[in-house]
Image: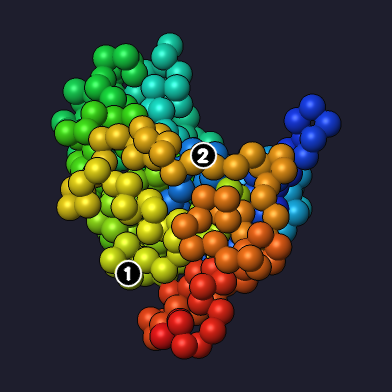
Amino acid sequence: TKHFPVRRRLRQIFRKEHEAVHAVDDVNLTLRRGQVVALVGESGSGKSTVARLLAQLYPRTDGDIRLHGVSTRVKGGRPFREYAARVQMIFQDPFASLNPVHTIRYHLTRALKIHGNAENLDAALHDLLTRVSLTPPERYLDKFPHELSGGQRQRVAIARALGARPEALLADEPVSMLDVSIRLGVLNLLRDLKERLNLAILYITHDIASARYFADQTLVMYAGRMVEGGDSETVTQTPAHPYTKLLIDSAPDPDRLIADIDPLEEDRGNGEPPSLIRPPSGCRFHPRCPSAMPRCSTDLPVPLQIGDTPGHWAACWLYDSPEVAS
Ligand code: SF4
Ligand code: MG
């Protein structure tokens, strides 16, 4: 398989009033073309930080980002510029990401020109809007963002990203600010684009049910670290990590496709995610974990293979012995 951006041992530390905030620690992920990877976690888990790291929006990071195996870390270098064009971000709030004083035509034209894809401008504009099902394009081109619905604006934001002819989209909660009734339509559009354009998509969400529906692979993040990963069906149907189980058990309706509330946002009965200034020692989940053992508060869990399912792993000491892991 062709590896898309490879991020190894990512670490991001912010400075906040002389204290280090360990937003993301030891994050490792690979995107491949034609695949959606979901990154699931509650607010404060560091999942948006991972998207911004992958978009190279931070000046300094430990770790590496590779495109087709080549490090992109030297800013201004050719691999970095190529990466910046090939990897496009879709933000949570489509209204904030579009400039209100400019028309849709302006936004899309600018994206096409920046990336050198504006040779047949009218045809290219037409094509972008058609790809996101805003048809006929003439009806939308000269509108301003406020004249469109939230769902239409997010479609414009996706069209603008496509103007770069990307290989990968980093979508940070792309539907969580949209009306529940139109979320599925936007996710289906992204899935359709993934297939037709052979895109790699990183789908960041707090909604594990939508990850099952939409993503091939699912990674679960807690307090800045990856705690479980595998194919989406396995992770959501037979979760191994106690935190993943908590996320699934807190979902109001396990059969729904798309949540209309953030379960752990609504009910903090199981405790809050820890401060990232002084993350808990050992397993960061131990203060909330119903299965915590003495070693959990001292030893940082390593990723362990779960059962026989290829690629299913969890960072949890419950699976440290072969008898239990089977
Ligand atoms: Fe719970 Fe221990 Fe597993 Fe952490 S390592 S999730 S505290 S059992
Ligand atoms: Mg966020």
Q: Is residue 247 above or below residue 237?
A: above
Q: Residues within 10 Å of mark 1 (few under 14, many from 20)?
A: few
Quadrant in which residue 238 is drawn: bottom left
Report whether 70 appears left or right of 93.
right
Judged by depth in the image, the label closer to the viewer, 1 or 2, is 2
Amino acid type at circle 2 is Glu
- In the rendered image of this protein, does residue 324 appear above or below residue 18? below
**Residue 265 location (% of width, % of height):** 40, 34
- Does dot 1 land on a helix, a strand or a loop? loop
Are there few (<14), some (14-19), or many (20+) residues within 10 Å of tag 2?
Answer: some
Task: Name which residue lies at 62% across and 47% down.
Answer: 53
> Is residue 241 in view?
yes
Q: Which residue is the site of mark 1?
A: 238
Dot 2 corresponds to which residue? 272
The answer to whether mark 1 and mark 2 are in CB contact below 8 A is no
Q: Is residue 48 left or right of residue 260?
A: right
- The residue shown at (49%, 41%) is 271
Name the N-terminal-most of marks 1 and 2. Answer: 1
